Image (spheres, helix red, strand yellow):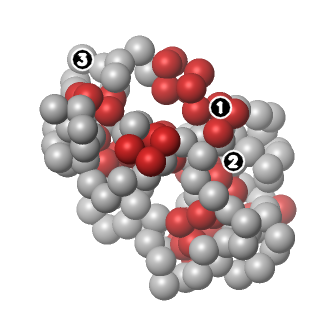
Amino acid sequence: GGCCQFPPYELCDMCPDGTEPNNDKKIPTGAVTPPSCKEFEFDTFAYNPIDGELGSCSDIFLRNAAFYCDCPGAEQGCGICPESGGVMFPEPTKLSLRDNLLRNESCRTMVFSSSLYSKDQCTSSLAAFGVDYGAFCGCPGTA
């Protein structure tokens, strides 16, 4: 919404050190056709702040997704599944399940959303969902 279709892209690089992301990789957003790293750089969603002020490059979805694109030093800090300390796992077992009472998001989308939080934000951010999405989405070991 709003007046402006595009944010000021020239302000933010995906990789914190300014190197080019691996554009052969895809960002697993939960979309039917996931965007490439380069396409994600031009997605207005990527510029939403996660837990900071609008206008800062350091805490936006784009920067926190950098690990998907092989950016140097970028690491995943959070995930809904307890495997590997809560970090990513291959796929939830209930990929298309929609929980209409809660957020109307697929489990695949929740896996992606949770992966964008930093280690510092992880526990409080997942608790804010109010639901154990790991168990709900069938993470490994949650039967």
Indicate which disc, 2 or 3, sits on the residue closer to the N terminus: 2
**Frontmost residue, 81 versus 27:** 81
Identify the residue shown where x is 80% and y is 52%.
57
Q: Secondary structure at mark 2?
A: loop
Badge 1 marks a residue whose secondary structure is helix
Indicate which disc, 2 or 1, sits on the residue closer to the N terminus.
2
Pointers 2 and 1 in contact (C-beta within 8 Å)? no
Secondary structure at numbered mark 3: loop
3D distance between C-alphas at marks 2 and 1: 13 Å
User: Which residue is the site of mark 2?
Assistant: 60
- Real-space Cα distance between discs 1 and 3? 25 Å
Q: At which x and y percent is residue 16?
A: 79, 64
Q: Position of residue 65 (x, y in %)?
A: 59, 58
Instruction: Check disc 3: other Cα within 10 Å, few if <14, some if 14-19, many if 20+.
Output: few
Q: Three-letter amino acid code at disc 3?
A: Leu
Residue at (44% x, 48% y) in the render: 84
Q: Position of residue 13 (x, y in %)?
A: 76, 67
* Residue where numbered disc 1 is placed: 121
For the point 46% across and 41% down, the residue is 86
- Number of the label disc, if any, that sits on residue 101: 3
**In the image shown, does 59 or 43 lie closer to the viewer?**
59
Quadrant containing the C terminus is top left
In the image, residue 114 lies at what x, y percent? 48, 40
Q: Name the amino acid type tagged 1.
A: Gln
The quadrant of the picture occupied by the N terminus is: top right
Front of the two marks 1 and 3: 1
Mark 1 vs 3: CB contact within 8 A: no
Could you give the CA–CA distance between mark 2 and mark 3, rounded to whole angstroms?
Answer: 27 Å
Q: Quadrant of residue 129?
A: top left
Horizontal side, residue 124 vs residue 91: left or right:
right
